Structure formats: structure tokens, C-alpha cells
């Protein structure tokens, strides 16, 4: 026994030292320590804030969401009145943000792609014009551009009583753009259904055409036929259901136009400002993406007899998109986040409604947390979608 | 930009509120700094706006100067922080300003849930409508369907919604945070009508491109007692702000103004002697110099003087004293005895 003791001791010491010196375990320990400190700090901040808010008798918690908002909101996608609760007011704001971000992103991608291709044009004038546009738009702060477009709407356009009518049923005034839309008729329901059915039919047709091409090498006029199905099917439905043509035409009643669809100057200015600004960045991304593909690839594709359209869709785009998508995602996020500048020109986006809420309830900490959470959700959803798309595109590699 | 500022303020609230030791009484803090930090409007003519030479002018600005005169004996030991309606209460809560003199309406909710304390009202106001003459509207009841320009985060935003709701009328609000941008949009015809406190409308109208093209409708749809505000919980500081305003009212009541205040030092009237600190006591009670009220009147003036030079008949605002006359003259301005 006595003999064995020192041996056991040394072994134990050796083991203990080894356990302590193991870099893997150490790393975990450090991480636990850091996490613990951050957690404690957070707990301390939170606790003290709550404590002191109570001492200053400032109300806390999210109970205010169920109180009556009692302020009006200028435009809304869902019915809203001052009698609704704060939570609904905030929802109206969030939907307005989504509206401007969604329409903005779609238009930005279209305009940006167009500009990016124009920038690469062999026509000197076209490419120089695109270059000037991109430089100018990138260099002017977005807030100034928004002020410019907003004052364009209310300073240059006349009052509703003297509204311009560039087209029949379209009115432009400092209250925005009002245009006639078809009046609701049950037939439109079927038209929409026909359109969806058309889309599904086109999807299967394309799959079939592709398989046939792989098997036999024969081409099928997919594009023309798809177009015909997607337009023809809804059109036939519309004609069959009696071709309802009644339009809701805007009319000047009292102070303002009634009927038709109205795009407010605030929305218009915000949308134009965001799209023109972000498109300049997207154009550069598209140009970079296209230029990233070696000239040899295009020449090779042409050499094996592909048509220019096929070169673009089969060789250039699949590769360019992989370069384009990641920076494009960040531009989309920028556009969404920049839409919070709406506050400056009075578009009731989420930030605008939330800051009114903060001021009416005095609950700044809760309000700002809500703003952060909502924008985080918008951004995460956009990135998730774009990452999924990116992965799908990346699979092209063989 | 604005959002960023609000953000910073909120962070300041969190930091200020999460400090373990709560900051000492505001008076000590202000004295250590050497000046009073005051939240003001910055864009509102007649209440708080710098003139062409950069000198701050207005009723709220003079109220703030009275506080500085009471604390330091020098009305210029002051720093003005312009705040929008949305930023103002957060700035006060976070301690960015010591006192808010920014035409804020006293309400029950702000007094309790916002953790504020309101001092003596320095202007009794009510909400009205400013409208272009060419629309030929004479009553607020004719405003059904109107597009209304209004500042966000104000009591007026709520009142106007209430008013249209109770009269079963429809409105379309246009809310812009900056006073100046909102006025610009209104004058350009973006809205049919601008609603705010009647005094503010007079101030906005005064800076219109053509003031005569606009009228203020006779309807007043709310009570708007505008008062300076401080953070809840510091009684001494609240007393000082409160009595700085009251001192101006009391001075007018006693017939003391900036011109005759030195003669009045020799007055035999006990109330005047107590007020000016010839008979000491009031200063000690507030924790101020005995000359505090003298300094206010000497350097800033009595309430009548600041009213007339900021918003009175000889200014572009051309406002009558109305509710803001002394109680003796049928108004609401009334001060408890200074003893």
C-alpha cells in the first residue's frame, strides 16, 4: 500500500493537469465564462432599468398594445380607425413597410438589371449615360433624394381642383396619383383562378419539354406557348363570364378624389427615391456579375451554335447570378432598412407609427425593442429567402 | 437620422436608468455643470426659435431664462437643445435636458405614466385649424373628407382624431415629424388644413409666404395647458421650475417689471419686500439665492412683458392675452402668495 501511494498520486496529478491543460475543454470553459458574464451583465442592466423605471414611476410592459390608439393613420392596407388598438396601428405600419419594400425591391431589380446591362453596352452614349446615372445617384444621400421627390410632388403638381389629366381617368395632383381601376366583379375571381391554373400548366409543360429535349434533342416552343397559356386562359375566362368592363373612375368630391386607386405623394416619393437610389448599386452588382464571366465562355457557347438568347440564359446568367445574389441580398436589406426614412416625409411606415406610439404612451424602451424585432424579422426573412435561392442557383455547378 | 437620434436617446435612457446609483438632485447637477440644459422647440416662432442673429426668442425660451436667472443669477447660463415632439419626453426622461420648455400639453397620462411632473402653465392654449381662405370654409364642421396636416406624437394628433370621430367625419392625416417640413407641405397645398394649438397656428401663419391667404377657424376643439416639465421624483427642482414661472406672474400681479424693479426694492409693501428678497426667506426655502425673483424680473421680465414681446399684439403673431391675462383681468394667470 505504502509503496503504491506515490505512484497513484503522480498519476492523479498528471491526469488533473492534463484535464486542465486540454485546449478543447479550456475553450469550452472560456466560452461558458464569457457567456456567463454577458448574461449577468444583461441581467444587471435589465434589472436596474426595471427598478429605476419603477422609481421614476414610468409605466413599463407591453400592456399598452391593448389600449385604444386614438390616432389616425394616413394610408393602410387593412381597415383601420382611431378606435382600434395600438397593436393594430403597429400592424398597419408594418404592412406599409412591407408594401413599400416589396414593390421597391421588384422595381429596383428590374431597373438595376437594365442599367447594369446598359452600362456594358457597346453604344458609347448608352453606357456613358448609365455611368453618369450610377455615379450621381450613389453620391447623393438618400434622405436628400427623398426630400427632393416629396417636394416634387407637392410643389410642382397642382391642387386636386386643377389636377392634370395626362390620360383619360388618370389624375395627377399634389394629393398624389389617382387612376381608374376595374370595379370589383365576381368574374375576376375566376380570372385569377384561371391564371393560377395557367401557371401550373406551364410548369408541367416546361418539365415535359425539357425531358423530351434531353431524350430526342428536339426543341419545343416553350416561351411562346407559355405566354399564350398565361394570357389566353384568363382572357377566355373573362370573355366567357360576360366581359365585365365597369371601371371605378376617380371623381372630385369635396376636398378630394373619391373612387379609383390612389397613390399618395408620400408613398410615391419614398418608392421613387428608394428605387432610383438602390438601383444604382444593383446596376454595379449586375455589371460586376456579368463581367466576372470569362469572354472565352461566351465565345465557346457561340462556337457550339447557341443563339444569343441561349448564351445568356444557359451560360452567362446561371454563373453570373451566383456572383450577383449575395451582394444583391444586402442591397435588398438596405432598401428595406432605408424605408424607415419615411418618417421624414410623412409616410406612415412602421417606424413612423412606432414613434408616434412611443410618444403617446411614453414607453420608449418597449417601442424601440419592437422596432428592432420587426426589422430583424424583415431582414432575416429576406436573407433566408435569398440564401435558399442562392443555394438553388449554386447547384448549377457540375 | 431622426431615428438614430431617438435611438441614442433610448440608449441614454437605458444607461441612465441602469446606473446603480441614481443621480443626485437636479439642482446640484445643474450647479456643477454651470448651466441649465433646456429642451425647446427650435422651429416654433413666438415660443422657441432663434432669430436672424441666432438669438433664441420666445415665450418658452424666456421661461427657461427665468429658471437660469433664479438658479445662477444669470439668465444666459443656459444651453438650448431643440427637440421634435417625438423626441422631447424621451430626452427629459434620459436626463439629456434638465427641464422641458417646449409647448408641451399637461395631461394625466404624461403626469403619471410618462414619469413627468408639470410645473405652472405658462400658456393656456386650445387646438384650432389653419386653412387657406380660398377653400371658403368657415366652420370646423365643414371639414369632412379633408386631408389634415398634424405633428406626430402630440395631443393634437389625438384630439383631431377624436373630433372627427365624434362628428362622424372622415379625415386623412399627413404626419411629418419636423415642424418646418410640415408647414412647408401645408403651404404647398399637400393638406387642406393644418391643425395644432392656436398659438402655434398663429406662429406658423406668421411665417407663411403670404400670411393673409390663411385664416384660423374660430372653432377651438380642446384645452391645451402648455407647461414646463421636469422628471418625476425631484421635488426641489420641480419647486424651482414651478416658482420661476409663478414669480413672473406674481411680479405682474404686484406691478413689478424689469424697468421699475430697482425702485421697487425700496418699496414699503411687505409683499413686494418678501418677493424681491428684501425680507429674506423665500430663497432659502427653495435652496436659491434670496435675490432669485429679483434676478428673474430684472433680467427676463414679468409675465406680461415676455408675453407681449414673444406673442403679443406688436408681434407678427398678434395674440390677445385672453385666458393668459391675470386673474384680475379675467384670465387664468394666478399665483399663490409668495410667503
Image (cartoon, coloured by chain):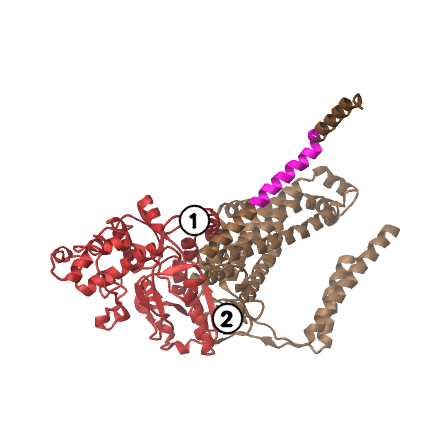
Secondary structure predominantly adopted by residues drawn in magenta: helix
Q: Chain of mark 1?
A: B
Q: Quadrant of residue B159?
A: bottom left
The boundaries of the magenta stretch are A20-40
Q: Quadrant of residue B106?
A: bottom left
- Position of the C terminus of chain A by quadrant: top right
* Residue under label 1: B22
Residue at horizontal 76 percent and vertical 22 percent from the top: A6
Left or right: residue A398 versus residue B121 is: right
Magenta stretch encompasses residue A34:
yes
Where residue A12 appears, x then y in whole percent?
74, 27
Among the chains, which one is red? B
- Please name the color used to draw chain A: brown
Judge the density around disc 2: few (<14), some (14-19), many (≥20) Cα neighbours within 10 Å.
some
Left or right: residue B190 versus residue B251 is: right
* Residue under label 2: A82
Where residue A126 appears, x then y in whole percent?
57, 47
Amino acid at each position: 500500500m505504502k509503496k503504491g501511494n506515490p505512484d497513484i498520486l503522480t498519476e492523479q496529478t498528471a491526469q488533473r493537469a492534463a484535464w486542465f491543460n486540454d485546449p478543447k475543454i479550456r475553450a469550452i470553459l472560456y466560452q461558458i465564462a464569457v457567456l456567463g458574464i454577458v448574461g449577468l451583465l444583461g441581467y444587471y442592466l435589465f434589472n436596474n432599468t426595471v427598478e429605476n423605471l419603477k422609481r421614476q414611476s414610468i409605466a413599463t410592459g407591453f400592456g399598452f398594445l391593448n389600449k385604444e390608439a386614438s390616432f389616425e393613420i394616413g394610408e393602410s392596407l387593412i381597415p383601420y380607425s382611431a378606435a382600434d388598438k395600438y397593436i393594430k396601428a403597429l400592424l398597419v405600419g408594418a404592412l406599409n413597410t412591407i408594401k413599400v419594400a416589396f414593390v421597391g425591391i421588384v422595381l429596383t431589380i428590374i431597373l438595376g438589371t437594365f442599367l447594369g446591362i446598359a452600362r456594358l453596352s457597346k453604344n458609347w452614349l448608352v453606357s456613358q449615360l448609365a455611368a453618369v446615372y450610377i455615379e450621381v445617384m450613389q453620391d447623393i444621400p438618400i434622405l436628400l433624394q427623398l426630400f427632393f421627390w416629396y417636394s416634387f410632388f407637392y410643389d410642382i403638381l397642382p391642387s386636386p381642383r386643377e389636377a392634370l389629366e395626362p390620360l383619360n381617368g388618370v389624375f395627377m395632383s399634389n394629393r398624389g396619383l389617382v387612376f381608374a381601376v376595374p370595379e370589383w366583379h365576381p368574374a375576376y375571381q375566376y380570372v385569377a383562378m384561371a391564371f393560377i391554373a395557367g401557371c401550373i400548366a406551364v410548369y408541367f409543360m416546361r418539365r415535359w419539354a425539357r425531358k423530351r429535349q434531353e431524350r430526342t434533342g428536339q426543341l419545343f416552343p416553350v416561351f411562346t406557348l407559355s405566354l399564350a397559356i398565361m394570357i389566353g386562359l384568363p382572357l377566355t375566362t373573362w370573355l366567357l363570364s360576360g366581359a365585365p368592363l365597369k371601371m371605378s373612375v376617380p371623381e372630385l368630391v369635396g376636398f378630394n378624389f373619391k373612387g379609383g386607386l390612389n397613390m399618395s405623394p408620400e408613398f410615391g416619393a419614398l418608392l421613387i427615391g428608394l428605387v432610383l437610389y438602390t438601383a444604382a448599386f444593383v446596376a454595379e452588382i449586375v455589371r460586376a456579375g456579368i463581367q466576372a464571366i470569362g469572354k472565352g465562355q461566351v465565345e465557346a457557347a457561340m462556337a457550339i451554335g447557341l443563339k444569343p438568347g441561349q448564351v445568356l440564359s444557359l451560360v452567362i446568367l446561371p454563373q453570373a447570378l451566383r456572383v450577383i445574389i449575395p451582394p444583391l441580398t444586402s442591397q435588398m436589406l438596405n432598401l428595406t432598412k432605408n424605408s424607415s426614412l419615411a418618417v421624414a416625409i410623412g409616410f406612415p411606415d412602421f417606424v413612423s407609427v412606432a414613434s408616434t406610439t412611443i410618444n403617446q404612451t411614453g414607453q420608449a424602451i418597449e417601442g424601440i425593442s419592437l422596432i428592432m424585432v420587426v426589422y430583424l424579422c424583415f431582414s432575416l426573412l429576406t436573407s433566408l429567402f435569398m440564401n435558399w435561392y442562392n443555394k438553388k442557383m449554386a447547384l448549377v455547378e457540375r | 437620422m431622426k431615428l438614430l437620434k431617438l435611438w441614442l436617446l433610448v440608449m441614454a435612457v437605458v444607461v441612465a436608468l441602469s446606473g446603480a446609483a441614481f443621480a443626485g438632485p437636479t439642482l446640484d447637477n445643474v450647479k456643477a455643470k454651470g448651466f441649465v440644459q433646456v429642451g425647446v422647440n427650435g422651429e416654433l416662432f413666438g415660443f422657441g426659435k432663434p432669430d436672424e442673429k441666432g438669438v433664441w426668442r420666445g415665450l418658452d425660451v424666456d421661461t427657461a431664462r427665468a429658471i437660469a436667472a433664479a438658479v445662477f443669477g444669470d439668465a444666459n447660463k443656459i444651453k438650448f437643445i431643440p427637440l421634435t415632439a417625438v423626441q422631447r419626453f424621451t430626452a427629459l426622461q434620459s436626463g439629456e435636458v434638465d427641464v422641458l420648455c417646449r409647448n408641451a400639453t399637461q395631461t394625466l397620462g404624461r403626469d403619471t405614466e410618462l414619469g413627468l411632473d408639470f410645473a405652472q402653465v405658462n400658456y393656456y392654449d386650445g387646438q384650432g385649424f389653419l386653412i387657406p381662405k380660398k377653400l371658403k370654409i368657415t366652420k370646423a364642421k365643414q371639414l369632412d373628407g379633408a386631408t389634415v396636416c398634424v405633428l406626430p406624437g402630440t395631443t393634437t394628433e389625438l384630439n383631431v382624431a377624436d373630433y372627427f370621430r365624434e362628428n362622424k367625419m372622415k379625415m386623412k392625416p399627413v404626419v411629418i415629424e419636423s415642424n418646418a417640413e410640415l408647414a412647408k407641405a401645408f403651404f404647398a397645398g399637400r393638406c387642406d388644413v393644418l391643425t395644432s394649438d392656436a398659438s402655434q397656428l398663429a406662429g406658423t401663419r406668421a411665417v407663411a409666404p403670404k400670411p393673409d391667404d390663411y385664416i384660423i377657424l374660430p372653432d377651438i376643439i380642446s384645452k391645451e395647458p402648455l407647461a414646463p416639465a421636469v422628471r418625476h421624483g425631484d421635488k426641489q427642482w420641480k419647486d424651482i421650475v414651478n416658482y420661476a414661472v409663478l414669480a413672473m406672474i406674481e411680479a405682474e400681479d404686484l406691478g413689478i417689471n424689469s424697468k421699475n424693479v430697482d425702485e421697487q426694492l425700496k418699496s414699503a409693501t411687505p409683499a413686494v419686500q418678501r418677493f424681491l428678497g428684501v425680507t429674506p426667506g423665500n430663497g432659502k426655502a427653495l435652496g436659491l439665492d434670496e435675490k432669485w425673483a429679483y434676478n428673474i424680473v430684472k433680467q427676463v421680465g414679468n409675465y406680461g412683458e415676455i408675453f407681449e414681446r414673444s406673442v403679443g399684439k406688436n408681434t407678427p403673431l398678434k395674440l390677445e392675452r385672453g385666458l393668459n391675462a391675470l386673474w384680475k383681468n379675467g384670465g387664468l394667470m394666478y399665483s399663490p402668495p409668495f410667503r
